[in-house]
Image: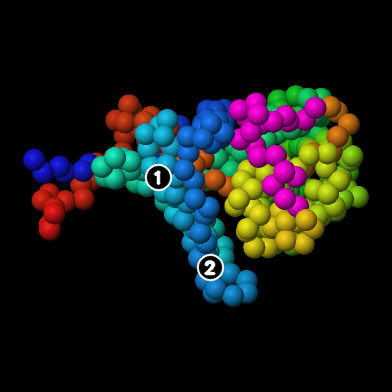
Amino acid sequence: MIMKPEILFLSQENVVEAGVLDMPNVMEQVENAYQFMGEGEVVNPAKIQLKIPEEGPWNSFFMSMPSYIKPLDVAGFKWAAESKDNVKHPGMPLGLDVVILSDPTTVYPRAIMDGTIITAMRTSGVAGMAAKYLARKNSKVATLVGAGVIGRTMVMAIMTALPELETIYLCDLNLPKAEALAKEFEGKYNVIASSDTEACAKQSDLIVTETTCTKPFLKREWVKDNATVIQMSGWEIDEQIAKDAARLYVDSWAQLSHFKNSLIGHLHDNCGLERDGVVELQDVVTGKAVGRTNDDELICCCTLGYGAVDITVANWIYENAKQMGIGTKLNLWENPLWV
């Protein structure tokens, strides 16, 4: 019998309808992904990046992020892409991502969906999960640096993780941009826009950097000795912050230690940092390692993104969409040629 694989296509609107903007549930899926990884139930090759142009500052890039998650019986792939040209065109997002989910046995695709909002939600969801384990429980002030798309979801994630926070400073060099984003949270959270990262950071118990900057800008002297610093890009913070930290956490040592122009890669190549000098977040989630142990220590966490997290969240969206009866059904073929 000829099998005709059916693919569920989910537009961005479908993905939103299926629940992607529900940050508490997204963070639950993020933590599930780290639990699976910590239990050795995930195959997750390091991401591969294609930059255009290849040398020097990129104008656009493409990144492949495959993963197999045994407990979910799914294999998947996120094709992540960004273009600096897009910011010149109103209404065009900087990043455009697509997720494919496949049956790991037959390899037939189950779903193709927009991954752009999944990326924004799960990126901040990882920071929120990290803050849950690493931030002081009496944290009152946070500084988030970057008022782009991730800035919006970061407010959602950090307030989900630390609802006791009294103030969030949202910093960006483009103050009107930060002010517009802060205004979205009026009446819900106390989000204050600022262009003075130094002044805000010096007051903060938690600092999260979520920018496109490729050079460190957060200085050690701006950071309190018992703060938690979470870096969401390759290299945004002074290396002394990582060196002074009581413990240094990463999402993936294998990935970050070999990633060019990253803080962890630099510390590994030039400062003698080895695997036993870091704690992977998956070990904290599974209880194999500890998070913050007291209110006096400086904690630093660096992440760059795991395909397994995208696929776990995307699979949850797919299952929701099937139950809700949304999306468009497609077929690869009527009769396959040359089987």
Specify the quadrant of the image occupied by residue 272: bottom right
Q: Nearer the viewer, residue 145 or 137?
A: 137
Residue 128 picture quarter? top right
Callout count: 2
Which residue is tagged 2? Answer: 51
Disc 1 residue type (three-letter):
Gly
x, y (%) of residue 67? 45, 45
Residue positioned most to the left: 1
* Mark 2 secondary-structure assignment: strand
Residue at the image point whose x is 64% and y is 53% from the top: 256
Q: Residues within 10 Å of mark 2 (few under 14, many from 20)?
A: some
Picture residue at 75% right of the left edge, 52% below the top: 273
Please provide the residue range marked out in magenta: 273-293
Residue type at numbered disc 2: Lys
Cα–Cα gap, marks 2 and 1: 22 Å
Tell me which residue sits at (72%, 56%) in the image.
268
Query: Which numbered circle lies on residue 76?
Result: 1
